Image (cartoon, helix red, strand yellow):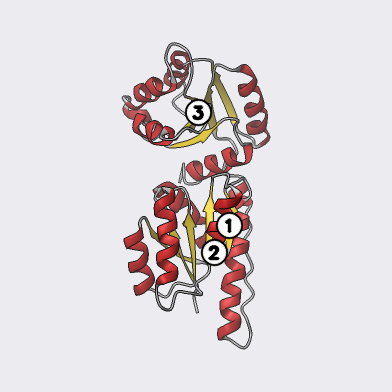
Amino acid sequence: MNKKVLIVEENNQHAKALSYFLSANNIGTLISRNLNETITALQGEEIDCVILDMGMPDKLAYQALEKIKENKGLENLPIIVFTGKDLSLAEQNRIKKYADSIVVKTAHSYQRILDEAGLFLHLVDEKNTVNPVEYKFGNLAALRNVLKDKTVLIADDDVRNIFSITKTLELHKMNVLTASDGKEALKILKENKQVDAVLMDMMMPELDGYQTIREIRTHSVFKKIPILAVTAKAMKGDREKCIAAGASDYISKPVDIDQLISLLRVWLYDTGK
């Protein structure tokens, strides 16, 4: 019997990336982007496990957790919470009332998700068959090599940030271009049409990140280039403000390198296909 995982995720690129890697390991997937779609899918499909992304607004994420468990027949459905947030102890305890596992988005999170999903799908097999199916997860070399030979532009006025991030990205065999302000970033982009992604500090002098991103998006050749916004601290509304300016995704300083690698893999896994 084929196993199916429901991915609950508002961000389409994150959902597609996770679905791609689960599918590559012979796990069927279905994607829902809101609470109504989730409940409809659970009532209409044979779902063996749910992966819920906590990137959606907190209230909606907790509503989804509560609503799933309220439904008759879904009380024991395994739920894995996938989050890029640093959860407080209170948040972790609240989530654990409903979820079976919490996985933080890092460079190694897809392996963790595969391990956790496999564990729960294996338990489902134990209940329903005499000989449980042993899941053998596929080689994740393709995932690890996603960033190899890709070119990223880092725009940041702090040379220390540029240096530390560049060193890490070069370890992943990425080509790194750097700019110390928005004007220089625009110039480099126009001269290097093969840039695969941009890491944009939002608080730069003269032309800040918001203005620079808006300017980048006016050029048709850069309409779809992934731009990851970097803000000095995670303030309420920052994410929405960055996305409204044209950013693809968002990460706060100090940059967690594991989370940055995870985000870059999400946005670059299907480029060049």
Q: Is residue 22 above or below residue 199?
A: below
Q: Secondary structure at mark 1?
A: helix
**Dot 1 and dot 2 residues touching (CB under 8 Å):** yes
Q: Secondary structure at mark 3?
A: strand
Which badge, 3 or 2, is on the more N-terminal residue? 2
Residue at which label 2 appears: 97
Residue 191 screen position, x and y as percent: 45, 18
Which of the labelled discs sits on residue 250, or is there none?
none
Q: Amino acid at mark 3?
A: Thr
Residue plotted at (46% across, 42% down): 271
| Residue 116 or residue 16, whichever sits in front | 116
Q: CA separation, marks 3 and 1?
A: 28 Å
Q: CA separation, marks 1 and 2?
A: 7 Å
Q: Amino acid at mark 2?
A: Lys
The label nearer to you, 3 versus 1, is: 1
Residue at which label 1 appears: 93
Q: CA separation, marks 3 and 2?
A: 32 Å
Which badge, 3 or 1, is on the more N-terminal residue? 1
Q: Residues within 10 Å of mark 3 (few under 14, many from 20)?
A: many
Residue at which label 3 appears: 231
